[in-house]
Image (cartoon, grey):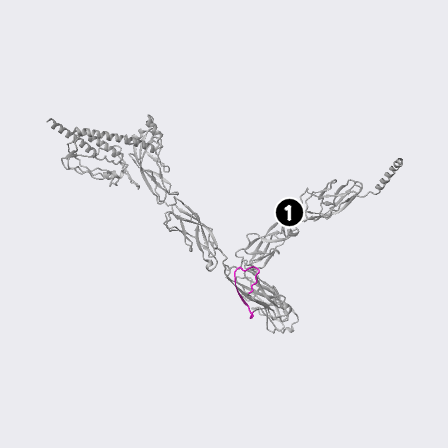
Amino acid sequence: MKNVKILHLPQLFVFVHACFAQADFAPYFYDNGPYSNNGNLALFSLSEDTPIGTHIYSLNGTDPEGHEVMYGLSFDPGSKEYFRVDPQSGNMTLVEKLDRENQDSIDVLVSITDGRSKVVERVTIFVMDANDEKPEFKNMPAFIDVLETTESGGSIYVVEAVDRDTGSGGSVTYYLQNPPSTLFAIDRHSGVLRLRSGEMLDYEKTKTHFVTVIAKDGGGDFNGKEQFLSSSATLTINVIDAQDTPPSFIGTPYFGFVYEVSMPGSEVFIVSAKDGDVGNPNPIRYSFDDGDDGVFSINKTSGIITLLTFPMYLKREVFNMKVRASEVSPEGRLMDYGVTTLVIRVVDLNNNPPTFYGENGPQNMFELTMYEHPPEGEILRGLRITVNDSDQGANAKFNLRLIGPGRMLRVVPQTVLNEAQVTILVEDSAAMDYEKHHFLTYKLLAVEVDTPERFSATADIVIHLLDTNDNAPKFSSDYYIARIPENSPGGSNVVSVTATDPDSGPWGEVRYTIYGSGAELFLIQPKSGIIYTQPWASLDAEVRSKYNFYVKAEDMDGKYSLAEVFVTVLDLNDHPPAFNENFLEKTMVIGAPVKIEAVDDDAEVPNNVIEYAIMKAEPDNNIFDIDIDTGEIVLKSYIKSMAIIQNITKQRDFTWSLVVQARDRGKPSFSTTAVVKIDITEATQLNGGPWGSFIMQGRNKPLQILGMLGGVISLMVIVTVIISTATFMRNKKSNRILPNRRVRRRRKQNAWNFKNPFKEPDSPGEKFKVEEDEQEPEVMVENINYNNNVNNVHSVNNVHSVNNLHSVNSVNNVNSVARYWPPPPCAPSLPPPAPPYIPGERQWAVPTISATVAPKPRKKPLITKQDTVNKALVSELKLRLEQKRMLTHQ
């Protein structure tokens, strides 16, 4: 058994092999249908915007014997090779850019082979459109000539653009570039450029118009996104002056009719022409050129065409006549002319035009009252209209049109045969607004369709609208800005707001209210909208300068609107500058400034901007400067030491009194003054002890130094009073001090008159002049208390000199009183006043400020009358002392 098998196995193998060799089948592609991405490319399509390098398809097939297959791809000779295939995987890749507009399909030879057999198939790949092409103008840009007499609404040019894309991407619509021309309009679909209705060209105003037309496609996909493409081109319109143009006929084309009942001499048609020279037109003469056959006549001046015979004798049913209109010069000769065609048709009589009927018979006026804004689609049932044409057949067919403002209403039906009930529907409810139209007037037009006569009929439709409360009040502005001066009295007007409600009657009445965080100081009149301050309100820009609140306008049904009010309180210059004190004491170290400061309580510049100036300085006015903005007082730059000051003033006293003015920049301007007492010292004088260190450390703290100095002075005064009291009591017990002092006058003396140093003198030499007698008075001293009197005189003089500029007005009053010798010879209880300042060569101008100062003294003071008085008192005291001694010795 085993031998048999072994012997037969080879034979069996050979047999099977032979069978397979004879049955070697060719490989084949899979046909997976048009929506598969692999197979044999059957009905495969590809978008033209596919990027190069994209894997677009996979060839897929098999070999019946299971052998490995290879794929191939080829093109017809001379064709562009758009694709490449991988032989093993069959993956196809796009290698060239597709363009459907140039080639919408590609023939490809695909092959599959198992190494022995090769199968080649021709397939067609369809290139699908993408929106990659802009519309292209075929007749733009262009230059055209248009007569200035072109009729309003007439066509002047047809723009044509083509988009090679398909579908919506290939549709083209036309627009005029923004801003739209006021003279021209274009039909979006046909591209017909027209003059706008009611507009005319005027050669005298504009000779050339440039109209930019935009052609835009309907959009389509490109690279996965929707894309709209457009192109633009400019049309140049040259306006042609019509001064030399021939006559032109009005209302062409002309169609006339002769009816079977017409009689000879009846009027058939009227032609009308006008001269192209509209500025100075010539008369027109009419005539026939051809086609009248002698059965019609035309009036040379009026253009009336009449019938010369009975219609039964007319040999034709249609007459095409050429009518000429010629200009007639003032001399009577014919000039330029125009020719038009008049078509006259002989027809049977169509003698019944359409007619409108109401409930009571023929009617051409229909009225209706209704509320504004009815629902869209609502039937106006109050209008009962019927239309009828009594003719038959085509003569009884007519169209209905509704002519009026906007597209608020529409008519149904639009075409009628013989008779129909007319229905009016609401098309645009929002446009039927009482505030815009109290009533609407429409023309209902019925025009025959297929008759030469085009008989027509019209009826007026008047719709009276009733108002509803459909509007809220509206302010004239979203916000109001007001300005009011501070310190305005209560009840002052601030601003008036205005809101209007277009509704009628009570619905249009507006009431105003205000509210908000800033409204507490204001009131508003509910009807007028006038905003004013509360009667008790006091506006102060220094406290608050900005207010804002809301104003509400409301109608009777609660419909309202809001506006915001901004109120600015304007600052007034109502605060003068103020120093902390009217008398200031400062210590100045040479080389260092002394600063004074005033404060102005006004809120805004320039009212609170302060300028400083030195109005007066004693004893010399030319050693200080002051910074106009900061108030810093410094010595002149050439003053480096105390010696220089002494050389200038010829005095050992380095105390200056300055009158400083602080003035604001407001209008009107306010000012105030202060007396500044300055003690000048050198820095070296303050370096020797603790007092010097204390003053140097505290020179920026003047109040601390003044407090310390005041304490020291008070202590010294208390000690002096105690010592003086003790001395007085001791001397009183020892009878060394007499109770009073008598000075006996030997002869009458003239009074001493001290003039006010700030009174303007009649001449420079009379300023501060002391009037006195030339002879010295003889006095007699009875009190021998010499030391006490002298000390009192010096102490009182010192106190008076210190307070001289602190109380300038008081000093002036004292100095202006005339002093006389007292009748009884007694010692004065108080020392005489300090000697007045003697004016120098220079006259002082009295400043317009709120304080006065003493005049500048001479550099070398002269001996005054007061010195003479002092000497007299001393002599008197000495004399009385000697007399007492003599009486004691006796």
Where residue 36 sits: x, y (%)? Answer: 71, 46
Is 367 in the magenta? yes
Question: Does any portion of residue 635 appear in the rendered image?
Answer: no
Query: The N terminus lies in which quarter of the figure?
Result: top right
Where residue 889 sits: x, y (%)? Answer: 11, 26
**Number of numbered discs visible in the structure rendering:** 1
Where residue 526 sits: x, y (%)? Answer: 42, 54
Where residue 405 sits: x, y (%)? Answer: 54, 61
Query: The C terminus lies in which quarter of the figure?
Result: top left
Is 136 in the magenta? no
In the image: residue 26, left or right of residue 755: right
In the image: residue 698, left or right of residue 17: left
Q: Residue 681, located in which quarter of the rendered image?
A: top left
* Main SS of residues in magenta: loop
Number of other residues with Cα within 10 Å of mark 1, as a class: few under 14, some 14 to 19, many 20 or more: some
In this view, the residue farthest toward the front is 1
In this view, the residue farthest toward the top is 688
Q: Nearer the viewer, residue 850 or 641?
A: 850
Q: Which residue is mark 1?
A: 222
SS at badge 1: strand
In the image: residue 244, left or right of residue 562: right
Q: Of the residues shown, which amino acid type is indicated by label 1? A: Phe
Question: Does any portion of residue 712 appear in the rendered image?
Answer: yes
In the image: residue 335, left or right of residue 89: left
716 w.r.t. 480: above or below: above
In this view, the residue farthest toward the left is 890
Bounds of the magenta segment: 359-381
Q: Residue 290, located in which quarter of the rendered image?
A: bottom right
Q: Residue 860, located in which quarter of the rendered image?
A: top left
